């Protein structure tokens, strides 16, 4: 086992090489990932050996024995993990983005040393509890409440679908303050809970049978706990701004979990289609197959470009509460690229893609909830469109091309999308159109990240191919936007609609 002191001192390339080596060793030599991929939880020795490399040291400041909290390193460790196992990468994402980051930024100094020490020396874990059975997308109306009683807060409610349910040592617990009239405050408070203390223990009422992400337990949690005052996070202004800063930073981290996963889909697609012969020719020789793999390659380039942008723009010192467009772009677009890449590889495997242990079909199931959690993608695209229209109205520029020409996040590539974007955006539009508009902006913002990565020296052929693919996608989205319909579901559709009556 590498001590955390050693982990903290290694140059990052050595640290990540060591981590990669350990993953290969535990997944393919000492154990066989294909054997346990269908079981719930990692085998204890596998998890122990992975954690022995001290992966969480990337999210712990130097003064507490960590590597110093560099976003690039956090994204790097998620990238390396997701090449081998998306659930492992999500486990890191939860601990780093949803627990250690917020603790680092908003917890009282006095309580940090013990928490960080337990992560470094005892491989402790922490997750985030926001979602409730009645309040998921509508999380700001959560009903879990807190009441101060002397030096402690009493927190009561029900939470569900928390990653690491029953497994985490620490939780970041969201709740609303109970007001004297019995109502709940609009603002959100966060508390750190520690399962070592009996009065902070969270009862798991039910473990869910999640269809993928088997190594991560999910379930329903009954909250009835007492937490010392010092364990309340300290927002700089309001709890709502803290919440948005936290959620946006986490969305900025999604490309880290995506890029390794997509690279794996790409490598396996290339290898498989070169080795599989159909009518004496490798599958790779077919034009349609080349196009399918080129799309995965584009996904790889886009997620790489997002990582590069995230590394420079989402450090803890930055205030991300207003970064809706970028945070939502990264999360919603990259999770669609993950799902699409897994679907493509499954198709290319033919019947063997339908085996439970196939990395591609597991990838479909494991990456699917990424489009739902931390804000469903439809909701995030709607928010992007709302921000865009608000800014356009403020500047009195309703032509999209004219607006994008001067918009900070599309300066490099706005011109490439003319004449596609040469149309006026309506001030009021149905939500289905907002979602399309949100998608259009997300693709153009992503193309700017790709161009920026190209300027830094990333291979130009991959950059050019991605720009072509994104343009094609934007063209389809713009055409859908112009051809919008108003079709709504007919609720009593089953009257006069049985084909048998007409045959
Ligand atoms: C694998 C997994 C891991 C999770 N991890 C965590 C965790 O660690 N901590 C935690 O607190 N929670 C977690 N969650 C919960 C997750 O954040 C919620 O499921 C999510 O916010 C959606 O809430 P909901 O399930 O109540 O769906 P609902 O709010 O009922 O929404 C259902 C669907 O309605 C549609 N919809 C909702 N709002 C809109 C809108 N404005 N516009 C258009 N369509 C809309 C979307 O299609 C959405 O998927 C996790 C969930 C899953 C599946």
Image: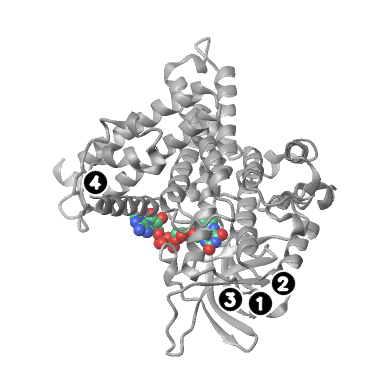
Q: Is residue 399 left or right of residue 383?
A: left
Q: Is residue 123 among what the camera can see? A: no
Q: Could you tell me residue 112's position as x and y percent?
A: 71, 66
Q: Is residue 145 left or right of residue 427?
A: right
Q: Could you tell me residue 463's position as x and y percent?
A: 48, 26
Location of mark 2 (residue) = 110
Q: Earlier in the sequence, mark 2 or mark 3?
A: 2
Q: Residue at x 55, y 39 (%)?
A: 308
User: Secondary structure under badge 1?
Assistant: helix
Among the 4 quarters of the image, the one containing residue 229: bottom right
Q: Earlier in the sequence, mark 2 or mark 1?
A: 2
Q: Is mark 3 within 8 Å of ligand 1?
A: no
User: Secondary structure under badge 4?
Assistant: loop
Q: Earlier in the sequence, mark 3 or mark 1?
A: 3
Q: Is residue 133 left or right of residue 500?
A: right
Location of mark 4 (residue) = 397
Q: Could you give the CA–CA distance between mark 1 and mark 4, rounded to whole angstroms?
A: 48 Å
Location of mark 3 (residue) = 223
Q: Could you tell me residue 474's position as x and y percent?
A: 33, 34
Location of mark 1 (residue) = 230
């Amino acid at each position: 086992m590498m001590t955390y002191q050693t982990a903290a001192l290694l140059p990052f390339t050595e640290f990540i090489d060591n981590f990669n080596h350990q993953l290969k060793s535990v997944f393919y030599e000492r154990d066989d990932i294909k054997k346990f991929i269908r079981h719930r939880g990692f085998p204890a020795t596998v998890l122990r050996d992975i954690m022995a490399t001290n992966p969480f040291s990337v999210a712990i400041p130097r003064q507490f024995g960590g590597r110093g909290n560099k976003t690039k390193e956090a994204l790097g460790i998620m990238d390396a993990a997701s090449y081998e196992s998306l659930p492992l990468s999500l486990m890191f994402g939860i601990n780093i983005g949803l627990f250690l980051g917020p603790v680092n930024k908003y917890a009282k100094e006095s309580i940090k040393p013990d928490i960080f020490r337990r992560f470094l020396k005892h491989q402790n874990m922490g997750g985030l509890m926001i979602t409730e059975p009645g309040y998921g997308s509508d999380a700001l109306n959560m009903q879990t409440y807190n009441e101060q009683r002397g030096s402690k807060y009493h927190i009561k409610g029900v939470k569900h679908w928390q990653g690491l349910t029953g497994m985490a040592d620490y939780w970041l617990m969201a709740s609303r303050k109970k007001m004297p009239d019995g109502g709940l405050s609009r603002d959100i408070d966060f508390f750190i809970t520690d399962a070592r203390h009996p009065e902070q223990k969270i009862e798991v009422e039910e473990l869910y049978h999640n269809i993928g992400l088997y190594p991560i337990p999910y379930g329903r949690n009954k909250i009835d706990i007492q937490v010392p005052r010092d364990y309340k996070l300290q927002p700089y202004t309001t709890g709502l701004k803290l919440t948005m800063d936290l959620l946006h930073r986490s969305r900025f981290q999604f490309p880290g979990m995506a890029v390794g996963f997509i690279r794996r889909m790409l490598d396996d697609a290339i290898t498989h289609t070169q080795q599989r012969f159909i009518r004496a020719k490798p599958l790779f020789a077919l034009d349609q197959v080349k196009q399918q793999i080129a799309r995965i390659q584009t996904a790889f380039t886009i997620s790489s470009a997002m990582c590069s942008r995230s590394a420079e723009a989402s450090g803890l010192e930055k205030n991300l509460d207003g970064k809706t467009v970028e945070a939502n772009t990264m999360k919603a677009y990259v999770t669609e690229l993950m799902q699409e890449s897994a679907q493509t590889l499954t198709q290319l495997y033919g019947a063997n893609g339908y085996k439970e242990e196939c990395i591609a079909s597991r990838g479909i199931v494991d990456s699917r909830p990424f489009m739902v959690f931390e804000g469903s993608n439809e909701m995030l695209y709607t928010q992007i469109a709302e921000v865009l229209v608000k800014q356009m109205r403020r500047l009195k520029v309703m032509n999209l091309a004219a607006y994008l020409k001067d918009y900070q996040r599309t300066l490099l590539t706005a011109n490439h999308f003319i004449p596609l974007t040469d149309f006026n955006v309506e001030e009021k539009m149905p939500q289905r159109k907002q979602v399309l508009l949100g998608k259009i902006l997300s693709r153009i913002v992503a193309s700017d990240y790709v161009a920026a990565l190209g300027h830094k020296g990333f291979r130009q052929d991959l950059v050019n191919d991605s720009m072509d693919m994104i343009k094609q996608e934007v063209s389809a989205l713009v055409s859908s936007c112009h051809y919008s319909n108003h079709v709504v579901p007919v609720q009593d559709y089953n009257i006069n609609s049985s084909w048998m009556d007409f045959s």
